[in-house]
Image: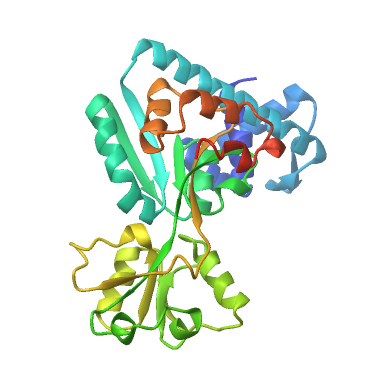
Amino acid sequence: MNFQQLRSVREAQRRGFNLTEVAQALHTSQPGVSRQIRELEEELGIELFVRVGKRLTGLTEPGAQVLPVIERLLLEAENLKRAADDFASAGSGRLRIAATHSQARYALPPAVRDFRAHHPDVSLHLQQGSPQQIARLLLDGEADVGIATEALAQYPELVALPCYRWTHAVVVPPDHPLASSREPLTLARLAQFPIVTYEPGYTGRSHIDEAFAAARLTPQIVLSAMDADVIKTYVELGLGVGIVAAIAFDEERDRHLRALDARHLFADNMTRLAVRRGAFLRDYVYEFIQTFASPLGRDVVDAARHQAPEDESDQAWRKAA
């Protein structure tokens, strides 16, 4: 039994049993992948995959039982390498951060600046995506830390800690009726105008939809995007009223727009920071986490990592957040 055999089995499941994609991911040949899988099956004395001819179509029942063990073995092998690196090259290495656009653009820069000042020998790699993509990067071991608003807490394989709460704002051109009106901003008034906001699954969009649904209103969403800067661009062009994260509005940079407080219209949102459960975290990863969210010290993070997934709740970490 060797790690290449274990990786071949893991990747076969991750890649939908497509051995061509498995071979590309492992930088080897398709016959080589097939051979690695078959040799492991022969050594274990069980078939791990259902086959139709030479094609893999799924996991057998023994395969489904064995796969989590393979995942743990490979994770511990990665942990062993990280632990050795922590001692052999203390203070240097690579930190891979996955974040949504809003977090990468507006929340992360101060933390990255401060972290780099104290850790000049750590190279930072920033990846952007949807909350679901961020979770996948963490689960696949392709990111060390993930930061997003939605979805991360839905994965039991991740430890998702609350960092801070934030609200939405409505953005309009200076001459827009909402900007000059003395009437309070309401969902009913907002629904009278075309709306430009986030794609579903991004930056608290679910709370926007829930608020309108609860008020029995159907907003006319004429454009949705992942990026607050894109939303503000189209608001400037007169396409509609924008709903963005309040942190995404900067009075100096966005001087052609006006921001209206909408915290009374939509529920608060929680930004979460996640790591893969069971993964070894190098010292500088803990330090980055606390730089981004000061209450999340090493003791708080480790307490969450060692807690059973079913026992975790926002209430348990309210003091940290």
Q: Is residue 76 above or below residue 191?
A: above
Q: Position of residue 282 (x, y in %)?
A: 43, 22
| Residue located 30% across and 80% down the image | 179
Q: Is residue 143 visible?
A: no
The one nearer the camera, 183 or 91, is: 183
Q: Which residue appears at 58% of the width and 35% of the height?
A: 33
Please determine whether, in this image, residue 129 is positioned above or below residue 192. above
| Residue 182 spot, x, y in % from top left | 34, 83
| Vertical order, 208 against 314 (above or below) | below
Instruction: Please indicate, yes or no, whether residue 132 appears anywhere in the rendered image.
Output: yes
Name which residue lies at 59% across and 31% down: 304
Q: Position of residue 32 (x, y in %)?
A: 56, 33
On-image quarter of the N terminus: top right
Q: List the single residue furthest toward the front.
A: 182
Q: Is residue 69 left or right of residue 292?
A: right
Q: Quadrant of residue 90?
A: top left
Residue 111 in picture, x, y percent from top left = 31, 38
Frontmost residue, 269 versus 30 = 269
What colouring method underlies this structural image?
Answer: rainbow
